[in-house]
Image (cartoon, rainbow, N blue to C red):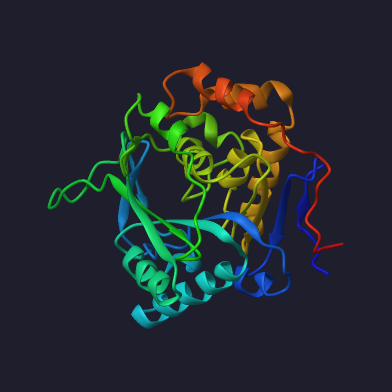
Amino acid sequence: MIKPYFKSKDRQFTLLHGDCVELLKQFKFKFDMIFADPPYFLSNDGISIQSGKPVSVNKGEWDRSKGYDFVNDFNYQWLKGCREKLKENGTIWISGTFHNIFSIAQMLNELDFKILNVVTWVKTNPPPNLACRCFTHSTEIIIWARKDKKRSHYYNYELMKEINGGTQMKDVWNLPAIAQWEKSCTKHPTQKPLGVLSRIILASTQPNAWILDPFTGSSTTGIAANLLGRRFLGIDQEEQFLEISKNRKIEIENLRIFKEYKQKIQGFKDKKQLTAYLLSEPELEYGLDLPFYG
Protein backbone atom coordinates (compact mmCIF):
# COMPACT_ATOMS: atom_id res chain seq x y z
CA MET A 1 0.00 0.00 0.00
CA ILE A 2 1.16 3.52 -0.80
CA LYS A 3 1.09 5.89 2.14
CA PRO A 4 0.16 9.46 1.15
CA TYR A 5 2.35 12.35 2.23
CA PHE A 6 -0.82 14.38 2.63
CA LYS A 7 -4.52 13.80 2.05
CA SER A 8 -6.97 16.67 2.46
CA LYS A 9 -10.04 16.32 4.65
CA ASP A 10 -12.32 16.53 1.61
CA ARG A 11 -10.31 13.74 -0.14
CA GLN A 12 -9.98 15.84 -3.28
CA PHE A 13 -6.27 16.63 -2.94
CA THR A 14 -3.60 13.98 -2.33
CA LEU A 15 0.19 14.20 -2.35
CA LEU A 16 2.74 11.39 -2.70
CA HIS A 17 6.43 11.73 -1.83
CA GLY A 18 8.91 10.02 -4.13
CA ASP A 19 10.00 9.36 -7.69
CA CYS A 20 7.00 9.50 -10.02
CA VAL A 21 8.34 6.72 -12.29
CA GLU A 22 8.56 4.31 -9.35
CA LEU A 23 5.32 5.37 -7.67
CA LEU A 24 3.25 5.18 -10.86
CA LYS A 25 4.19 1.49 -11.17
CA GLN A 26 2.57 0.72 -7.84
CA PHE A 27 -1.11 1.31 -8.64
CA LYS A 28 -3.61 0.75 -11.46
CA PHE A 29 -5.83 3.82 -11.09
CA LYS A 30 -6.17 5.90 -14.28
CA PHE A 31 -6.64 9.64 -14.70
CA ASP A 32 -8.70 11.82 -17.02
CA MET A 33 -5.91 14.33 -17.52
CA ILE A 34 -2.25 14.83 -16.66
CA PHE A 35 -0.36 18.08 -16.44
CA ALA A 36 3.42 17.80 -16.20
CA ASP A 37 5.97 20.52 -15.60
CA PRO A 38 9.13 18.39 -15.72
CA PRO A 39 12.66 19.72 -15.18
CA TYR A 40 13.67 22.13 -17.95
CA PHE A 41 17.35 21.45 -17.21
CA LEU A 42 18.06 25.17 -17.03
CA SER A 43 20.43 25.11 -14.05
CA ASN A 44 23.69 26.03 -15.80
CA ASP A 45 25.14 28.56 -13.34
CA GLY A 46 23.71 31.51 -15.28
CA ILE A 47 21.99 34.66 -14.02
CA SER A 48 18.38 35.82 -14.38
CA ILE A 49 16.22 38.65 -12.99
CA GLN A 50 13.55 38.39 -10.29
CA SER A 51 11.77 41.43 -8.87
CA GLY A 52 14.36 43.65 -10.52
CA LYS A 53 17.33 41.87 -8.93
CA PRO A 54 19.89 39.46 -10.48
CA VAL A 55 19.51 35.88 -9.20
CA SER A 56 21.08 32.54 -10.03
CA VAL A 57 19.15 30.35 -12.47
CA ASN A 58 20.17 27.26 -10.49
CA LYS A 59 17.14 25.57 -8.95
CA GLY A 60 18.64 22.31 -7.69
CA GLU A 61 20.39 19.17 -8.87
CA TRP A 62 17.04 17.89 -10.19
CA ASP A 63 17.20 20.67 -12.84
CA ARG A 64 20.80 20.10 -14.00
CA SER A 65 21.32 18.34 -17.34
CA LYS A 66 23.63 15.35 -17.64
CA GLY A 67 23.66 15.28 -21.44
CA TYR A 68 21.27 14.51 -24.29
CA ASP A 69 21.05 10.77 -23.66
CA PHE A 70 20.18 11.36 -20.02
CA VAL A 71 17.47 13.91 -20.89
CA ASN A 72 15.92 11.70 -23.58
CA ASP A 73 15.87 8.62 -21.33
CA PHE A 74 14.46 10.62 -18.42
CA ASN A 75 11.63 12.00 -20.58
CA TYR A 76 10.89 8.61 -22.10
CA GLN A 77 10.61 6.91 -18.70
CA TRP A 78 8.27 9.38 -17.02
CA LEU A 79 6.11 9.77 -20.13
CA LYS A 80 5.81 5.98 -20.41
CA GLY A 81 4.67 5.82 -16.79
CA CYS A 82 2.14 8.59 -17.35
CA ARG A 83 0.79 6.96 -20.50
CA GLU A 84 -0.05 3.82 -18.54
CA LYS A 85 -1.98 5.93 -15.99
CA LEU A 86 -4.12 7.80 -18.54
CA LYS A 87 -7.62 6.67 -19.44
CA GLU A 88 -7.95 5.61 -23.06
CA ASN A 89 -9.55 8.96 -23.98
CA GLY A 90 -7.29 10.93 -21.64
CA THR A 91 -4.93 13.75 -22.53
CA ILE A 92 -1.63 15.07 -21.22
CA TRP A 93 -0.21 18.60 -21.16
CA ILE A 94 3.53 19.21 -20.80
CA SER A 95 5.20 22.59 -20.36
CA GLY A 96 8.76 23.44 -21.31
CA THR A 97 11.23 25.62 -23.17
CA PHE A 98 13.65 24.82 -25.97
CA HIS A 99 15.90 23.20 -23.35
CA ASN A 100 13.60 20.18 -22.97
CA ILE A 101 10.51 20.46 -25.17
CA PHE A 102 12.00 18.99 -28.37
CA SER A 103 13.10 15.89 -26.48
CA ILE A 104 9.60 15.59 -24.99
CA ALA A 105 7.94 15.89 -28.40
CA GLN A 106 10.23 13.16 -29.73
CA MET A 107 9.40 10.85 -26.83
CA LEU A 108 5.67 11.50 -27.22
CA ASN A 109 5.92 10.32 -30.82
CA GLU A 110 7.98 7.28 -29.88
CA LEU A 111 5.33 6.32 -27.30
CA ASP A 112 2.55 6.69 -29.91
CA PHE A 113 0.76 9.70 -28.42
CA LYS A 114 -1.09 11.99 -30.81
CA ILE A 115 0.04 15.61 -30.43
CA LEU A 116 -3.05 17.84 -30.63
CA ASN A 117 -1.57 21.30 -30.16
CA VAL A 118 1.66 23.08 -29.37
CA VAL A 119 0.54 26.09 -27.34
CA THR A 120 2.78 29.14 -27.00
CA TRP A 121 2.28 30.87 -23.68
CA VAL A 122 3.31 34.52 -24.08
CA LYS A 123 4.11 36.01 -20.69
CA THR A 124 2.82 39.56 -20.42
CA ASN A 125 5.40 40.32 -17.72
CA PRO A 126 8.67 38.49 -18.60
CA PRO A 127 11.99 39.29 -16.88
CA PRO A 128 14.43 41.39 -18.95
CA ASN A 129 17.36 39.91 -20.83
CA LEU A 130 20.55 40.75 -18.92
CA ALA A 131 23.06 39.99 -21.67
CA CYS A 132 21.37 42.28 -24.22
CA ARG A 133 22.78 40.03 -26.95
CA CYS A 134 19.55 38.26 -27.93
CA PHE A 135 15.76 38.70 -27.71
CA THR A 136 14.07 38.63 -24.31
CA HIS A 137 12.82 35.16 -23.41
CA SER A 138 9.10 35.71 -22.95
CA THR A 139 7.40 32.43 -23.88
CA GLU A 140 7.00 28.85 -22.78
CA ILE A 141 5.73 25.94 -24.86
CA ILE A 142 2.89 23.67 -23.71
CA ILE A 143 2.28 20.48 -25.69
CA TRP A 144 -1.20 18.94 -25.57
CA ALA A 145 -1.42 15.28 -26.61
CA ARG A 146 -3.87 12.43 -26.30
CA LYS A 147 -3.08 8.84 -25.41
CA ASP A 148 -4.87 7.06 -28.24
CA LYS A 149 -4.68 8.25 -31.85
CA LYS A 150 -7.99 6.54 -32.64
CA ARG A 151 -10.05 7.58 -29.62
CA SER A 152 -11.75 10.95 -29.31
CA HIS A 153 -10.83 13.27 -26.45
CA TYR A 154 -12.74 15.92 -24.52
CA TYR A 155 -12.35 19.53 -25.61
CA ASN A 156 -14.57 22.28 -24.21
CA TYR A 157 -14.72 24.17 -27.50
CA GLU A 158 -17.66 26.40 -26.63
CA LEU A 159 -16.17 27.66 -23.37
CA MET A 160 -12.79 28.37 -24.95
CA LYS A 161 -14.58 30.29 -27.70
CA GLU A 162 -16.57 32.26 -25.12
CA ILE A 163 -13.44 33.15 -23.15
CA ASN A 164 -11.85 34.31 -26.41
CA GLY A 165 -14.61 36.83 -27.11
CA GLY A 166 -16.74 34.64 -29.37
CA THR A 167 -14.04 33.45 -31.79
CA GLN A 168 -12.03 30.23 -31.89
CA MET A 169 -9.25 30.23 -29.32
CA LYS A 170 -5.80 30.12 -30.92
CA ASP A 171 -2.72 28.24 -29.76
CA VAL A 172 -1.06 31.47 -28.60
CA TRP A 173 -2.08 32.48 -25.07
CA ASN A 174 -1.27 35.89 -23.62
CA LEU A 175 -1.32 35.35 -19.87
CA PRO A 176 0.76 36.82 -17.03
CA ALA A 177 3.26 34.89 -14.94
CA ILE A 178 2.42 34.32 -11.26
CA ALA A 179 1.06 37.23 -9.27
CA GLN A 180 2.19 38.17 -5.78
CA TRP A 181 -0.95 36.75 -4.16
CA GLU A 182 -0.10 33.31 -5.58
CA LYS A 183 3.06 33.25 -3.47
CA SER A 184 1.23 33.38 -0.13
CA CYS A 185 2.74 30.05 1.03
CA THR A 186 6.19 30.93 -0.41
CA LYS A 187 7.09 30.49 -4.06
CA HIS A 188 8.31 27.42 -5.89
CA PRO A 189 11.21 28.25 -8.27
CA THR A 190 9.25 27.14 -11.36
CA GLN A 191 5.72 27.91 -10.18
CA LYS A 192 3.03 28.25 -12.84
CA PRO A 193 0.16 30.76 -12.57
CA LEU A 194 -3.37 29.65 -11.80
CA GLY A 195 -4.56 31.37 -14.98
CA VAL A 196 -2.60 28.98 -17.22
CA LEU A 197 -3.60 25.83 -15.32
CA SER A 198 -7.24 26.91 -15.07
CA ARG A 199 -7.48 27.29 -18.83
CA ILE A 200 -5.86 23.90 -19.39
CA ILE A 201 -8.16 22.15 -16.91
CA LEU A 202 -11.35 23.77 -18.18
CA ALA A 203 -10.40 23.07 -21.80
CA SER A 204 -9.80 19.36 -21.36
CA THR A 205 -11.73 17.98 -18.38
CA GLN A 206 -15.27 17.66 -17.14
CA PRO A 207 -16.46 18.16 -13.53
CA ASN A 208 -15.17 15.62 -10.98
CA ALA A 209 -12.30 14.56 -13.26
CA TRP A 210 -9.18 13.09 -11.68
CA ILE A 211 -6.02 15.02 -12.57
CA LEU A 212 -2.42 13.88 -12.04
CA ASP A 213 0.70 16.03 -11.78
CA PRO A 214 3.86 13.86 -11.61
CA PHE A 215 6.16 16.85 -10.87
CA THR A 216 3.74 18.70 -8.66
CA GLY A 217 6.07 21.29 -7.11
CA SER A 218 3.81 23.74 -5.28
CA SER A 219 0.73 22.08 -6.85
CA THR A 220 -0.74 24.93 -8.85
CA THR A 221 -2.38 22.11 -10.83
CA GLY A 222 -4.08 20.79 -7.71
CA ILE A 223 -5.17 24.18 -6.42
CA ALA A 224 -6.67 25.04 -9.81
CA ALA A 225 -8.30 21.60 -9.98
CA ASN A 226 -10.01 22.00 -6.60
CA LEU A 227 -11.07 25.60 -7.28
CA LEU A 228 -12.71 24.33 -10.48
CA GLY A 229 -14.43 21.23 -9.06
CA ARG A 230 -11.88 18.59 -10.08
CA ARG A 231 -9.86 16.10 -8.02
CA PHE A 232 -6.10 15.81 -7.79
CA LEU A 233 -3.05 13.64 -7.12
CA GLY A 234 0.40 15.22 -7.05
CA ILE A 235 3.82 13.57 -6.82
CA ASP A 236 7.17 15.15 -5.98
CA GLN A 237 10.58 14.04 -4.73
CA GLU A 238 11.23 17.25 -2.78
CA GLU A 239 9.60 17.36 0.65
CA GLN A 240 10.00 21.14 0.87
CA PHE A 241 7.80 21.53 -2.22
CA LEU A 242 5.20 19.12 -0.88
CA GLU A 243 4.99 21.27 2.25
CA ILE A 244 4.21 24.31 0.08
CA SER A 245 1.55 22.25 -1.72
CA LYS A 246 -0.02 21.10 1.54
CA ASN A 247 -0.13 24.62 2.92
CA ARG A 248 -1.72 25.95 -0.28
CA LYS A 249 -4.49 23.36 -0.04
CA ILE A 250 -5.07 24.10 3.65
CA GLU A 251 -5.22 27.80 2.75
CA ILE A 252 -8.12 27.36 0.31
CA GLU A 253 -10.07 25.30 2.83
CA ASN A 254 -10.97 28.74 4.17
CA LEU A 255 -14.15 29.50 2.21
CA ARG A 256 -13.41 33.23 2.00
CA ILE A 257 -9.97 32.61 0.48
CA PHE A 258 -11.41 29.90 -1.81
CA LYS A 259 -13.91 32.38 -3.28
CA GLU A 260 -11.37 35.21 -3.40
CA TYR A 261 -8.82 33.16 -5.33
CA LYS A 262 -11.41 31.99 -7.86
CA GLN A 263 -12.24 35.62 -8.62
CA LYS A 264 -8.56 36.54 -9.03
CA ILE A 265 -7.75 33.93 -11.68
CA GLN A 266 -6.54 35.64 -14.87
CA GLY A 267 -7.62 34.78 -18.41
CA PHE A 268 -11.34 35.55 -18.29
CA LYS A 269 -13.40 38.47 -19.57
CA ASP A 270 -14.20 39.60 -16.02
CA LYS A 271 -14.57 38.21 -12.49
CA LYS A 272 -18.11 37.00 -13.19
CA GLN A 273 -17.37 34.88 -16.29
CA LEU A 274 -15.66 31.99 -14.49
CA THR A 275 -18.16 32.00 -11.60
CA ALA A 276 -21.11 31.91 -13.99
CA TYR A 277 -19.63 29.00 -15.93
CA LEU A 278 -18.84 26.94 -12.83
CA LEU A 279 -22.40 27.40 -11.60
CA SER A 280 -23.56 25.65 -14.76
CA GLU A 281 -21.43 22.57 -14.01
CA PRO A 282 -22.39 19.75 -11.60
CA GLU A 283 -21.02 20.24 -8.09
CA LEU A 284 -17.93 18.38 -6.92
CA GLU A 285 -18.78 14.92 -5.57
CA TYR A 286 -17.23 14.77 -2.12
CA GLY A 287 -16.26 11.54 -0.43
CA LEU A 288 -14.77 9.83 -3.49
CA ASP A 289 -11.22 8.71 -2.82
CA LEU A 290 -8.21 7.24 -4.55
CA PRO A 291 -8.44 3.46 -4.08
CA PHE A 292 -4.79 2.49 -3.97
CA TYR A 293 -3.41 3.50 -0.59
CA GLY A 294 -4.14 2.96 3.06
36 with respect to 223 (left or right): left
**The one of 133 and 8 positioned closer to us in this rendering:** 8
Pick out the residue farthest to the bottom. Answer: 69
Pick out the residue farthest to the left. Answer: 133
At a point 34% along the width and 79% down the height, the residue shown is 68
The x, y position of residue 136, in whole percent, is: 21, 46
139 with respect to 283 (left or right): left
The x, y position of residue 30, in whole percent, is: 67, 62
**The one of 15 and 165 positioned closer to us in this rendering:** 165
At a point 36% along the width and 67% down the height, the residue shown is 105
At a point 35% along the width and 53% down the height, the residue shown is 117
Pick out the residue farthest to the right. Answer: 294
113 with respect to 173 (left or right): right
The x, y position of residue 221, in whole percent, is: 57, 46
Quadrant of the snapshot with the C terminus: bottom right
Q: Residue 101 falls in which quadrant of the image?
A: bottom left
Q: Residue 1 falls in which quadrant of the image?
A: bottom right
Numbered label tally:
0
109 with respect to 264 (left or right): left
The x, y position of residue 232, in whole percent, is: 67, 49
